[in-house]
Image (spheres, rainbow, N blue to C red):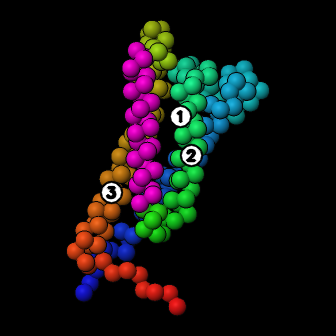
Amino acid sequence: MRSLVHPRDLRMPTWVIVWLTISAIIQTYDACYVLLGPLSHAGGPLSGMWPGHVFYGTFDHRYADFDSFGSAQSWANLLEVVVIVWALAHAKRWSGVVVGLIVTVATFWKTVIYFLVEISSGLEMTRQSLERGDLLGFLMVAVLPNLFWIGFPIAVVITLGRQVMRVGRAAGSGELRPPAASV
């Protein structure tokens, strides 16, 4: 009896590994900026390490000043990075695929919640850029980059979700054989 599962379904695709690696680096860098404020913020002695974040803070005040929600997001980022590192360490195993899927769902919803909090607050942290008439800047700086944190996770969830479904179907039909015992 042949297994219906291709061996590549039991490991993470290379592009997902690359995305998760980049994601972990960016999330760590971002969390450090937020959690080290005001040292890392505009005028702080460490602000030179985060010029893009200082600029971004002119559009999203959650990044310019201490904000409890932004701080909570940053702590969540660091926890997420720990899980990503675990998934990457197990990328060639089925467990890495499953944990990679779970952590990517978390990334997606964390970003959606960030947007929903901002929308629900009446654009409290970002409306000043709109009030000064900088719609293009708002879209290019505050919205477009954040869409990557929705788009890439959706692509990863679809890819890893399909893998999980194929393996689940094979396991359910009895076509999935356990790995040979090690001697």
Front-lying residue, 157 or 83: 83
- Dot 2 or dot 1, earlier in sequence: 1
Disc 1 is placed on an element classified as helix
**Residue wearing tag 3:** 161
Query: Quick check: can you spot residue 137?
Result: yes
Left or right position of 44 against 9: right
Q: Residues within 10 Å of mark 2 (few under 14, many from 20)?
A: some
- Where in the figure is residue 2, as x and y percent of width and height? 26, 84
Amino acid type shown at disc 2: Leu
Asked if disc 3 and disc 1 are in contact, CB closer than 8 Å, the reply is no
Residue located at (35% from left, 46% from top): 154
Q: Which mark is residue 79?
A: 2
Answer whether residue 121 is magenta in the image: yes
**Residue wearing tag 1:** 73
Segment tinted magenta in the rendering:
98-123
When the figure is inspected, residue 175 is found, relative to residue 104, above or below; the finding is below
- Where in the figure is residue 125, as x and y percent of width and height? 50, 18
Front-lying residue, 134 or 147: 147
Disc 2 is placed on an element classified as helix
Residue located at (26% from left, 78% from top): 175
Disc 3 is placed on an element classified as helix
Amino acid type shown at disc 3: Gly
